[in-house]
Image (cartoon, rainbow, N blue to C red):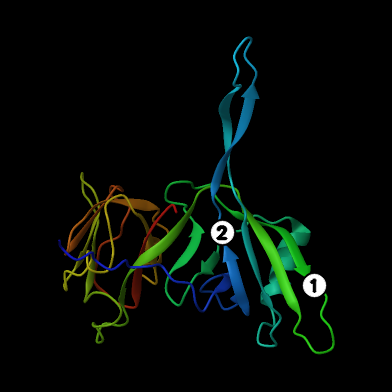
Amino acid sequence: MAALNSADYLTAEDMAIVLRQGTVNQAIVAGLDNITLPGVSREIVTVKVFREYISRQFTTGGKLGNLAFSGTAVKQDTNGYDQLFVYYKANTKFKDCFVYLNYEDFLTVDTANDTQAAFQVAELMKDAADSNGVIPQSGSLILNGLPAVFYAHSEVMSATVTTPVGGGTLDFVKGSGTVDTITDSDSAFVTDGFKDGMSLLIRGATTAANDAVLTTITTAEAGTLTLASEGELTTEAGAAATILHGGTLG
């Protein structure tokens, strides 16, 4: 009997919520001990049928669950909860929120498949603490649309340092009458976890317009990502300080 392969578990450590991701006004909700990821459910209708012993059940409309979090107040978190409270008071819909499950992997709205998706703050709580205890804090965010967990990453730190987290040099190729592609000189896309059908998030591209491209990966090969977009990328050779993230729902 062949030995079973060990599971590659998605673990949660160094959890945090990062708001206004990547800007000079970035705000971090630190000190988190627990994050409940949003699930899906449907309402159930029970119908009693004449002369039948067992009633019948039917599912109706579905809904996406909330994202809940809890932790303890820390002095280093000077603006994270404050920014959430600002969003709460204004009932703001915001997209630039990354919910980190660990140092690399995160959940955010899947704008590649749902351009209207956004977060809203539903609840913020600061619970009671005695004189010997820490101050617990908790809250929940609702999602107006689809989320995705991004767990595939390929990164180039600079033009001279080409052996970071993921691949070597990345080349962006704008499609001309065909689809866009991204190539990796180290052929590490599959090793880095990229798969067919993933949503693609581009960050830190030399051409800022490439960061705004919302697309999915139709085919993931070792050295090439073939995208669903056509002519949306701007061609870049040897992209530096660029990070690619691939994610899926659930």
The quadrant of the rendering that contains the C terminus is: bottom left
The residue located at (54%, 67%) in the rendering is: 99
Dot 2: element: loop
Counting from the top left corner in percent of width and height, residue 10 is at 41, 67
Q: Residue furthest top?
A: 51
Q: Amino acid at mark 2?
A: Lys
Nearest-to-viewer mark from 2 and 1: 1
The residue located at (60%, 48%) in the rendering is: 144
Counting from the top left corner in percent of width and height, residue 56 is at 58, 22
**Mark 1 closeness class: few <14, some 14–19, many ≥20 residues within 10 Å:** few
Residue contact between numbered discs 2 and 1, judged by CB atoms under 8 Å: no
Which mark identifies residue 127? 1
Q: Nearer the viewer, residue 5 or 122?
A: 5
Cα distance in 3D space between marks 2 and 1: 27 Å
Q: Which residue is mark 2?
A: 95
Q: Residue furthest front?
A: 53
The quadrant of the rendering that contains the N terminus is: bottom left
